Amino acid sequence: MKTFQTMISAAVISIALAGPGLTATQPSAVVKGYADLAEAMYSDSLTAAKGLQTAIDAFLASPSDETLKAAREAWKTARVPYQQTEGFRFGNPVVDEWEGKVNAWPLDEGMIDYVDAGSYGATSDSNPLYTANVIANEEIRIGKDEVDASKIDKDLLGKLQEAGGVESNVATGYHAVEFLLWGQDLNGTGPGAGNRPFTDYLTEGGTGGHNDRRRDYLKAATDLLVDDLQEIVEAWGKDGDARKEVIAKDGKEGLTTILTGLGSLSYGELAGERIKLGLILHDPEEEHDCFSDNTHNSHYYDQVGMVAIYKGTYKASDGKVTKGPGLAAYAAEKAPKEAKAVEAAMKKAEDALAAIKKRAADGVESYDQMIGEGNEEGNKLVQAAVDGLVGQARAIETLVAKLGLKIEVEGSDSLDNPSAVQ
């Protein structure tokens, strides 16, 4: 087996060349480099998901504390490359339409499996499937329709995804798998993540009930995640729809797509919906990886990915580097002052998110504790990340104006109208 150091030293360096007649600071070259980067980043995500699939197969073959721990670690590992791809959202329709299958959140986990009624509740005015518990029930009513759930497979999960038009009916993707591996986090803003026992997956006896169906669900959700990632890798490949769509755009329209993704993820999605909302409400349910207490990593790698997309360089998990004409080089030539401000803002945002990641990794406290009411130090750290991301979005908007472009950045009530947040 190769060591990590050997893999890095032997890494293949892949250069996405501008092509005949193109220079690194032509918009069309930047857009081609962007598409190459997307293919590389999603390919890395697919490889990591296949590693998760292998670990889950091993866990189901022999459930134990050790194999469950290995599956959980593989899930966390798989999140690292995927989170870095999120800057491709909000500007690419192919990605926007696909993304909900793999990373939708928050989810009403009672639709999937058993929950603690005391903390979760029994009903929801907005979701008739709030406690449907597919694992325990072989027939599910969705509106007027009775759905045969006797066989839990990929087809069934596809039917359940956002069933009844309710976005929180998340049946597939990373977070469904996360819930099945960890279970609910019942610790509030206290220490500790979900603690589902491996005995929930024993084929005889065990805990939780309906263990065969739970095993089927975990297997189907994991396999479907791999399938969905394969789909998006192909979409960014040579003849893929996502690549064709962005390459076909006028060069400056392509730049607009790139900047829309970076600005919207920075502001409305990450600073607003994923961070500021939870901070306003002091609600541990409003954290992205709420079952595993992995949110500090998810937020950090979102930012790492945005920097990679802006600079046009990505280093995969195996050490392979994809490097092409990046937006940073184009901006430095056309708007040097504004480009410098973007890079400074990106560094500030990354430093703030790195501080959150370090606090959690060092065992001081997890992200859901940091946003807890009365935690002045933790709240301050999280607010600094919000401020850094907002500053990054503003710097991007200033660059957009200088380049003579126009973008629409995704908003968030948490930032734009906090009094409306309850």
Image (cartoon, grey):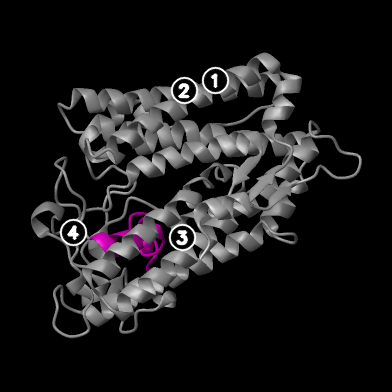
Q: What residue do we see at 57% from left, 31% from top?
A: 408
Pointer 4 local density, CA inside 10 Å: few below 14, some 14–19, many at least 20? some
Pointer 1 local density, CA inside 10 Å: few below 14, some 14–19, many at least 20? some
- Residue located farthest toward the right when viewing the structure as drawn: 21
Quadrant of the rendering where the C terminus is positioned: top left
Give the amino acid at mark 3.
Answer: Lys
Pointer 3 local density, CA inside 10 Å: few below 14, some 14–19, many at least 20? some
Between the C-alphas of marks 3 and 4, the distance is: 25 Å
Residue 412 seen by the camera: no
Is disc 3 placed on a helix, strand or loop? Answer: helix
Could you tell which of marks 3 and 2 lies nearer the N-terminus? Answer: 3
Say which mark, if any, is on residue 101.
3
Per the rendered image, the range of residues in magenta is: 158-182
Between the C-alphas of marks 4 and 1, the distance is: 40 Å
Q: What residue do we see at 40% from left, 22% from top?
A: 387
Name the residue beneath numbered marker 2: 348
Name the residue beneath numbered marker 4: 195
Q: Quadrant of residue 110?
A: bottom left
Marks 1 and 2 in Cβ contact (< 8 Å): yes
Is disc 2 placed on a helix, strand or loop? Answer: helix
Q: Can you give x and y, in whole percent of width and height, for residue 82 in the image?
A: 49, 52
The mark closer to the camera, 1 or 3, is 1
Is disc 1 placed on a helix, strand or loop? Answer: helix
Is disc 4 placed on a helix, strand or loop? Answer: loop
